[in-house]
C-alpha cells in the first residue's frame, strides 16, 4: 500500500481527520503503517471500507484524487492544521493553485445580490482571478456564471460527494465550469450525500482556497457567516458588499462591515484590499482616459502601505499575548469600554490577528 492509497483509505473512515492521523503517523512511522495498525475501520458511508473501489470509481468518473502525498495537493491545505486527507477533483487541477477570490452568499438571494455578484465575478475573472464558490443556488451560482461570462476560471466546492451532486439544478453549470478550464471538487468520498454536517466542512475548503472572501448577501444566521469566520481564522481578507439596511438578505453583510470586514463596492475595491497580485491592474487601465498623470499618481499611491492597525487596535494589541486575557482586564489596561473592546477584538479577529477563547477571553492568533 502506498502513502496515497493509505490517505484515501483513511478518508473513508469515520472520525479520522488530519490531526488524529498525524498522531498515528508519529506512532507508526507512515500513513501506510498507520492504516495497517488502525483497528476501528468504521466507514463514513454504509458498507465495507474499500479504498481500491474508490480508485476504480475515480477512474470511471474521470476524477483525480489528491492527497498530501501528491505534488499537486494545494499548498494552502498543507498550511492548515486540520487539512483534508483527500480532495476529489473533476476538471483542471491547476485551477486550485492559482490566486483566487471566494464569493459566497445566501441561496435566497435578491435580484440586486445576484446582479452584483455576477458583475463582480465578471470583473475579477477578467483580471485573472479564479472565482471560488459553493455551487449552491443564488449568490454562488451567479458568481460562477459571472466568471464564465468573462471567459474566466471558476471552481465549485461541493457539500456532497461528486457522484451525489447537489443541487441538481446546477449540474449543467458545473459541466460548463469544467469544460472552460475550471473544476468541481469535494473532500467527501463517493456515495456521501449532502447533509447538515457536510456544508460547514465545505465552507472551510472554500475559505482555505481563496486569498480573500467576499460576502454578497447573507442573513444573520447563515453558512456565509461561517465561511467568513473560518476565513478570518485562516488569515484571509474578509470583505462584504453592503445592501439595504432594511433587507434581511443583507443583514449579515452589514454586521460583518460593522465588525471590521472591508466594505467593497466593485472589483477595484477588492483589488485595493488584496494588493497587487498581477502587476498593474487591468481595471485601472480605463480610468480617467488613461492619462499619464493619473497613472503616475496611482503607481505612486501603491508605494504607500497602509498600517496594519489603527491607533485603537495598536493600543489593544499591546495588551494581548499568546495567553488568553479577559475582556474585563483589557478594559482596565486600555481604558476602553467593554463595547469598544468587543468591537476592536472582532475587527482584529476578522484580520486573523486574534482568537476568541472560552470564558470571554482573547489571545493572539496561533501560527499555523
Image (spheres, rainbow, N blue to C red):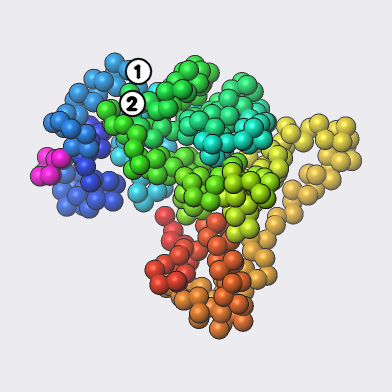
Task: Give residue 201's quadrant in the image.
Answer: top left
- Which image quarter: residue 6? top left
Mark 1 is surrounded, within 10 Å at the Cα level, by few (under 14), some (14 to 19) or many (20 or more) other residues, namely few
Which residue lies at the image location 40% right of the left edge and 72% below the top edge? Answer: 359
Which secondary structure type mostly characterizes the magenta part of the structure?
Answer: loop
Q: Secondary structure at mark 1?
A: loop
Task: Measuring from the top left, give residue 241's x and y in whole percent.
Answer: 65, 44
Residue at image position (39%, 35%) is 159
* SS at badge 2: helix
Residue 79, above or below 315: above
Q: Quadrant of the N terminus?
A: top left
Assess whether residue 202 is covered by the magenta stretch: no
Residue 167 shown left or right of residue 320 in the figure: left
Q: Nearer the viewer, residue 113 or 319?
A: 113
- Residue stretch rendered in magenta on the structure: 36-42
The residue that mark 1 highlights is 62
| Horizontal side, residue 208 vs residue 252: left or right | left
Q: Which mark is residue 164?
A: 2
Which numbered disc, 1 or 2, marks the residue that appears first in the sequence? Answer: 1
Q: Is residue 192 above or below residue 206?
A: above
Residue 269 % position (x, y): 70, 44
Q: Residues within 10 Å of mark 2 (few under 14, many from 20)?
A: some
Amino acid at each position: 500500500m502506498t502513502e496515497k492509497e493509505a490517505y484515501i483509505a483513511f478518508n473513508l473512515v469515520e472520525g479520522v481527520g488530519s490531526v488524529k492521523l498525524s498522531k498515528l503517523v508519529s506512532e507508526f512511522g507512515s500513513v501506510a503503517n498507520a492504516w495497517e495498525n488502525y483497528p476501528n475501520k468504521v466507514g463514513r458511508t454504509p458498507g465495507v471500507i474499500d479504498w481500491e473501489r474508490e480508485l476504480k470509481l475515480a477512474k470511471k468518473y474521470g476524477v483525480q484524487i489528491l492527497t498530501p502525498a501528491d505534488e499537486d495537493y494545494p499548498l494552502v491545505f498543507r498550511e492548515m492544521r486540520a487539512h483534508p486527507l483527500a480532495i476529489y477533483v473533476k476538471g483542471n487541477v491547476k485551477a486550485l493553485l492559482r490566486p483566487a477570490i471566494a464569493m459566497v452568499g445566501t441561496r435566497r438571494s435578491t435580484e440586486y445580490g445576484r446582479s452584483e455578484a455576477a458583475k463582480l465575478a465578471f470583473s475579477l475573472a477578467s483580471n485573472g482571478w479564479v472565482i471560488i464558490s459553493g455551487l449552491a443556488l443564488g449568490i454562488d451560482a451567479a458568481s460562477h456564471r459571472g466568471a464564465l461570462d468573462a471567459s474566466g476560471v471558476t471552481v465549485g466546492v461541493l457539500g456532497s460527494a461528486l457522484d451525489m451532486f447537489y443541487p441538481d439544478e446546477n449540474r449543467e453549470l458545473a459541466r460548463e465550469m469544467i469544460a472552460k478550464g475550471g473544476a468541481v471538487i469535494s473532500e467527501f468520498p463517493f456515495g456521501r450525500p449532502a447533509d447538515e454536517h457536510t456544508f460547514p466542512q465545505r465552507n472551510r475548503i472554500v475559505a482555505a482556497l481563496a486569498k480573500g472572501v467576499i460576502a454578497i448577501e447573507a442573513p444573520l444566521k447563515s453558512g456565509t457567516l461561517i465561511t467568513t469566520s473560518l476565513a478570518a481564522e485562516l488569515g484571509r481578507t474578509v470583505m462584504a458588499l453592503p445592501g439595504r439596511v432594511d433587507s434581511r438578505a443583507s443583514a449579515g453583510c452589514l454586521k460583518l462591515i460593522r465588525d471590521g470586514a472591508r466594505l467593497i463596492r466593485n472589483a477595484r475595491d477588492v483589488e485595493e484590499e488584496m494588493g497587487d497580485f498581477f502587476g498593474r491592474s487591468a481595471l485601472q487601465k480605463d480610468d480617467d482616459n488613461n492619462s499619464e498623470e493619473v497613472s503616475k499618481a496611482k503607481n505612486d499611491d501603491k508605494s504607500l502601505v497602509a498600517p496594519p492597525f489603527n491607533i485603537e487596535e495598536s493600543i489593544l494589541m499591546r495588551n494581548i499575548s499568546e495567553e488568553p486575557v479577559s475582556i474585563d482586564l483589557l478594559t482596565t489596561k486600555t481604558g476602553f469600554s467593554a463595547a469598544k473592546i468587543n468591537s476592536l477584538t472582532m475587527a482584529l479577529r476578522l484580520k486573523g490577528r486574534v482568537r476568541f477563547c472560552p470564558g470571554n477571553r482573547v489571545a493572539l492568533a496561533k501560527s499555523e
